[in-house]
Image (cartoon, rainbow, N blue to C red):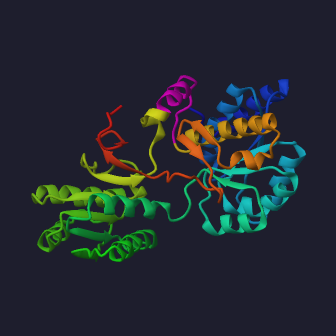
Amino acid sequence: MINLRGIAAFLVLLGAAAQGHAAGVTIGIVAPQNGPLALLGSQIAAGAGFEIQQSGNTLVAVNETCEDNSGAAVADALVNAKVQIAIGFLCSETLEGALPKLKDAGIPAITVSVRSRILMEDALKNGWPLFRLAPADGTEAAKIIEVILKDWAADPIALIEDGTIHGRELTEAVRNALEQNGLKPVFTDTYRPGQEQQIALVRRLKRAGATRVFIGGDRNDVAVIARDAKAENIPLSILGGDAMRAADQPLPLNAGVRAVALPEYALLQEGAAAAETLRAKGIEPEGYVLPSLAAARIAGQAVEAAAQAGKPLQETLLGTTFQTPVGAVTFNGTHELSQNPYRLLEWRGNGFFPPGAPTQ
């Protein structure tokens, strides 16, 4: 596993190896190398660095501080290193300053993290070469709505949330979509989060006749509600959001609870082989590791394909389908993922898996 102390040495070794033969595509990795985001930066470095080394390409590591007005210096470093494409970019602050200069240099940027819809709107308006491997704002809600309308439309539905900004906005988006489709929840409420028991809440759900409940809250609150419903013999089908991807403690989640979330790709068929290879090299395929590996693979293949076809790199990135450990990836005309990356998943006691899929 790549730890925080090892990230700088890891990048130096990979960069030295790549520069030694100066072969293939020159790819910039923009990620924090120190500070509070260094752990996430190490995941980006590990996944992308592994792929770049395996592909025989050249790595250029650039530190990302995520501070306001830091992006121009990042862009200058990438331009001076003559990179052909850059990946990573944890923070919108970096991209805001870097993208104008990257446009002038013809260097596309693939972010694995930044979700801001406003930033992408600005990029499209100004012709900035931004491509998003991360989900855009609103895609979590869109997938939840799709799942509920498909699977729950004929059932009595409850919507509850924890009062946080995210929980409230997510649940409100679901409620609005249901009402637009002629569906009215039988119960809506804001519950008090962080409680040791929610027996009164589950009894109110029963009195309302709800059999399906969407919960806009964190994993532990969902675990408490699921436990208390089971103890009260109240049959509830429970669905949560991406906040369910958290530690399974202090109260374990009941098997069968579902979530619309970004998957742990190492648990899925498309990522299992890459995860096994990474673990053999001492790299745990967690967090941004596999998405960053995918970004590096896309970057290398796109540059090579553009050169072979004599086409502009941005044109090649648009509409081309790339096979990666996070599945098939295609960027649409707005530089977003053509497929919503959120999936319906089910807790099996040791991970979230697609319903009906075998447990690893």
Image spot of residue 103 (x, y percent) = 82, 57
Image spot of residue 31 (x, y percent) = 69, 48
Majority secondary structure of magenta residues: helix
Q: Is residue 15 visible?
A: yes
Would residue 161 appear left or right of 75 to someone viewing this image? left
Q: Is residue 197 visible?
A: no
Would residue 339 appear left or right of 305 to someone viewing this image? left
Which quarter shows the C terminus?
top left
Quadrant assignment, res 234 = bottom left
Magenta-colored stretch includes residue 109: no
* Residue at x 32%, y 34% (from the top left corner): 359
* Residue at x 41%, y 57% (from the top left corner): 243
Is the residue 192 above or below the residue 52 in the image? below
Which stretch did the figure color magenta?
Answer: 271-286
Quadrant assignment, res 72 = bottom right
Is the residue 80 above or below the residue 191 in the image? above
Is the residue 70 above or below the residue 345 in the image? below
Image spot of residue 138 (x, y percent) = 50, 65
**Front-lying residue, 193 or 145:** 145
Magenta-colored stretch includes residue 274: yes
